[in-house]
Amino acid sequence: MTHIRDEINRVTQSRRMLAHGLITPQLGQADLDFMDQQAATLKVDAWKGYTGAAPRGFDRGWFVDDEKIAYPMLERARKLGVKRVCLHKGLPLGPVADYNHPRDVIKAARDFPDIDSLVYHAGLQGVSAAKPSGDVPWTTELGQMKKKEPGLRNIYMELGSTFGQLVTTNPTACAHLLGQIVDAFGADHAVGHGLDLVRNAAVADRGVPALRDPGGSDRRAQVRAAHAGGEGADLRAQRGAGLRRRRQRQTKRDPPGLPEPHEASLPRRRPRAEPPLVRLGRRPLKESTMGDRALRRLTWAWLLAAAVAGCGGLTAKQESGWVAFHVCQQGSASASLEDLLEGGRVNYRTQEGVEFASMKACMERRGYDCDLGLAIGARPHTHCYPKAS
């Protein structure tokens, strides 16, 4: 992914994309050597670890506050100058769910104050209803621990999958979670898309004061407290009035698009004509602006050039791995190649079940030892190493 990062940042003249390097501290010196390699050759921006995952030869995960297992990794991150450590917490994976609990982040953050810890998924245990008290399993516990350590400013809460799942399946639990994160960590320590929701929405949590806008303006982040019933205030009337005002302003700016009446008395603009369709393969796609079309052509040209250039520079071991993977892929349609390393290691993903087993067996017949690196959703990430001759 680092070459994609570099190309996107070059085209946009910005640093909008960052890349992780993988950490597996249970592997000891092998992991430290791999960190050195990733920092030197890939120039990674941060580290990503899966504390619940068990690599080959292990039956459990690890904790980031384990001074024997994880602290050498954190010391190496400090030495390499890549001082962002991102950890999969919550949404349990691996053989022992408890290793996904975020409680261990607090001690590690205290012992390494110069290293930023990013808690992926905000440590959410799962998509479930909040308790009557408003507690959200695992995330609330981490917030309570953090409030006992007000001096800790190097823990950040990532909201991506957590917000996306909760806001649609359990808005009340989502509101409690957002309010508790802002209260314990601060709005400027919540990372993810759509953070204006923290400033503008009615966040149903208890006793959270107004916070300064992290953007630096004089506005305050209005985080509203829940009423006695435990639910957030009903703001439908306020939202309706605000929507009417926005629609009216938009109508004045663009008078040809006349509003139509709506059953809730909110003006609704007539939809514009659908753009023509273009066909790519078997799927019709909407044609948009000339800029988008030019960007698509540029992207395809760049990918083709990268593929041609990349195939010409394979080592003998990489070429053997490439051939073995594509031969075995014929019987496993879901298999997708992830990495092809110089030492001959092949990383790929497949669906669970029959295809995972058949792909692994095929690679082993072709001279590779394979293990399950980590499982992401229903697509296990498999590592295959050339057998020692």
Image: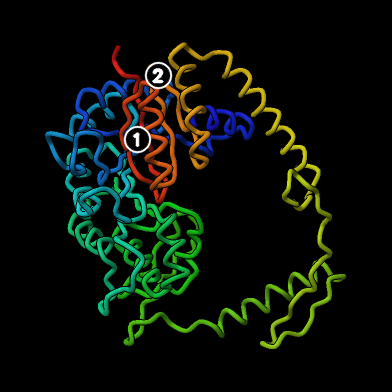
Mark toward the start of the polypeptide (1 vs 2): 1
- The correct choice, above or below, for 190 with respect to 75 in the image is below
Determine which residue is flagged by label 2.
Answer: 344
| 70 lies above or below 247 | above
- Image location (x, y in percent) of residue 197: 49, 65
Q: For mark 1, what is the residue?
A: 47
Amino acid type, mark 1: Trp
- Residue 186 in sight here: yes
Q: Left or right of 376: which side holds 248?
A: right
The residue lying at 78 percent from left, 47 percent from top is 279
Which of these two is toward me, 243 or 60?
60
Amino acid type, callout 2: Gly
Q: Nearer the viewer, residue 217 or 69?
A: 69
**Residue 292 in the image: x percent, y percent?**
74, 43
Position of residue 345 measured from the top left corner of the image (x, y, whole percent) = 38, 23
Compared with residue 271, is residue 335 higher up or lower down, i.e. above or below? above
Q: Secondary structure at mark 2?
A: loop
Toward the right, the furthest residue is: 256
Residue at 81% x, 62% y: name it.
274
